[in-house]
Amino acid sequence: MKQTFKFVTAEEAASFIKHGDVVGFSGFTAAGSPKAVPTALAKRAEELHSQGKEFKIGMFTGASTGDSLDGALARAKAISYRSPYQSNKDLRNAMNSGEVEYYDLHLSSLALSLRYGFVKKPKFAILEICDLKENGEVVLTTGVGISPTISRIADYVILEYNRFHPRELAGFHDIYEAGDPPHRREIPIYNASDRIGTTTLKIDPKKILCVVETNQADEVGGFTPLDDVTTRIGENVASFLASELKLNKIPKEFVPLQSGVGNIANAVLASLGNNPEIPPFDMYTEVIQDSVIKLMKEGRVKFASGCSLTVSAEMLQEVYADLDFFRDKLVLRPQEISNSPEIVRRLGLISINTALEADIFGNVNSTHVLGSKMMNGIGGSGDFTRNSYFSIFTTPSTAKGGKISAIVPMVSHNDHSEHSVKVLITEHGVADLRGFSPRQRAEMIIEQCADPMYRPMLRDYLKICGSGHTPVNLGACFGMHRQFAKTGNMLDTKWEDFTG
C-alpha cells in the first residue's frame, strides 16, 4: 500500500485530542475496539492531571469495550460522560460514584441519535481496521458498532491498523446506514443471511487524520464453564421451545433466534444445539459467541448475523484458520441494523435475554442493583424484546448463595414491562405469561420460577396485597430489597416490618 496517509505513534495520535472533545469508538464489546490510542490517551490524561490541568472527554461506543479503552480511561479519570452499554468494573464504579455521567440507550437508537443531533457530535472517530486503501476504504475487524455513522459525521478519523486480524476478513461485513425521516424506506432484509450494503467502510480520505499500526488481540475474556444452574436454565429453554414446536406455536422450519451475552446465553444455545427436537436454525443477533461457532461447525446453526464476533481467543483462532468455511455463514453489521426493531419484527425473532431480577408480574430489571447502582446497561435487550415473535427472559432464581432472590414483589428498576415480557425461565421452571392476568402471572411465577425457600414469603406477600387488578402493597413491595440493604439477606424479610 502506498503510504498516502500519515502514520504516527499512538502517543502522537492521542495528542490531537483535547480536553472537552467528544470521541466515538469502533467495536461492539471488546471485539473491534481500539486499544493503543485509548491507552495512550489515558496516559496523557494522567500526565496532564499531575500538572494540575484538566483533561476529560465525552465518549460514545458501540457497546462495552476492552479494558484498554473503558478501563484505562476510567482509571485515568479521563471520562466526563459515556454512552451507552458498558461492562468494566472501574468504569462502573466511576459511574455509580457520580464521577462519570452515564446515559443509557437502546443500542439500535444510538447511531440515529448521533445523526439527528440528539446527542453531541463526535469530533473524532477512532476505528480499528485490518486493511486500508488509498481511497479511504477500510475493512473493519471483529466488531462494527457505530463505525459507519461516527466515521461520517466526525470531523477527524484516527485509524488503528491492527495486523493481528487478517486482511481476509474482507467480505464478512455488511455496511449499511438506514435512511433518515421523512423519506426513510424499509431496510430490505427478509432473511438472516441477506446482504444489503458494502463489505468495506468508505471514509472520506481527507478526514483520516492519521494511522497507528498495532498488533493486538481482542480483549474478550473466556466464559465460565457451565454449572448445574446454567445447565438447567438452558435445558428449560430448549424444552419449552421444543414443546412450542409440537403445539405448532412456532413454524415447523423454526424462526431465527436472538440471544444475549454471557454464560447463561452460551448455556442456552448449547442446550438448543443438543436438543434433537429443534431443527437447525438461523441467528439474527448482536453478539456472536463461542457457542454459536461451535454449533455452526456441527451444522446446528445454519447462519449467524450479528454486530460483533465476540469469541474467546482460542475460538477466534479456529475461525481465522478456516475463514473459507465461515465466509458464507457469518455476517457482521452495524448495530442499527443488527438490532433494528423493524427487522426483528419482520423476521419474527425469538429473543432470549438475561434478567438481573424479575417481579411476580413479569416486569424485568436488566440494569440496576437495588434500584440505583448501574450494572452494565440495557444494551440491545429492549430492541429485541419489544418486537420479537415472543420474548424469553432467563435468570438464576437466587444470587449471593441464596441471600438474594431474583424473583421479587416489585422490581427495583423497570427496564422491560410486563407488556413486553412473555416467558420467564429459571433453573426451577418456566412461566409462560401470555394471556394471563397480573394475579395469575404472580401465582405462576412464584410456583414455577422462584426458589422454593422464597415461595412461602412471596405467597405471604400476595396475601397482604388485598384486591385490585394488580395486587400491590405499596408499603411492602420493596421490603425484600430494604431488608437486604439492612442485613444482607432477603430471607430475613418479615412483612409486618413494612406494613405498619
Image (tube, rainbow, N blue to C red):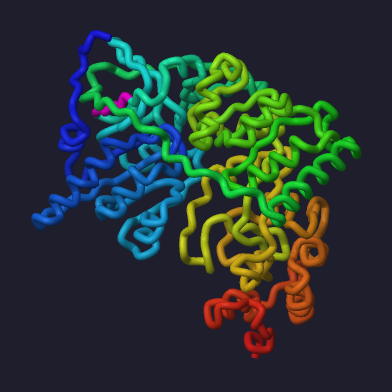
Look at the image and tell me whether residue 112 can be seen.
no
Q: Give the residue at x 35% y 28%.
A: 128
Residue segment shown in magenta: 156-161
Quadrant for the C terminus, please.
Answer: bottom right
On the picture, is 448 further left or further right than 259?
right
Q: Residue furthest left?
A: 51
User: Which one is nearer the viewer's eye here, 482 or 341?
Assistant: 482
Residue at x 46% of width, y 31% of height: 143
Say whether residue 435 is visible: yes
* Image spot of residue 99 (x, y percent): 30, 61
Q: Residue 414 is drawn in which quadrant? A: bottom right
Q: Is residue 183 magenta?
A: no
**Residue 125 placement, left or right of 187:** left
* Foreground residue among 378 and 5: 5
Q: Which quarter shows the N terminus? A: top left
| Residue 449: percent from left, percent from top | 76, 61
| Residue positioned most to the right | 247
The answer to whether 226 appears left or right of 435 in the picture is left
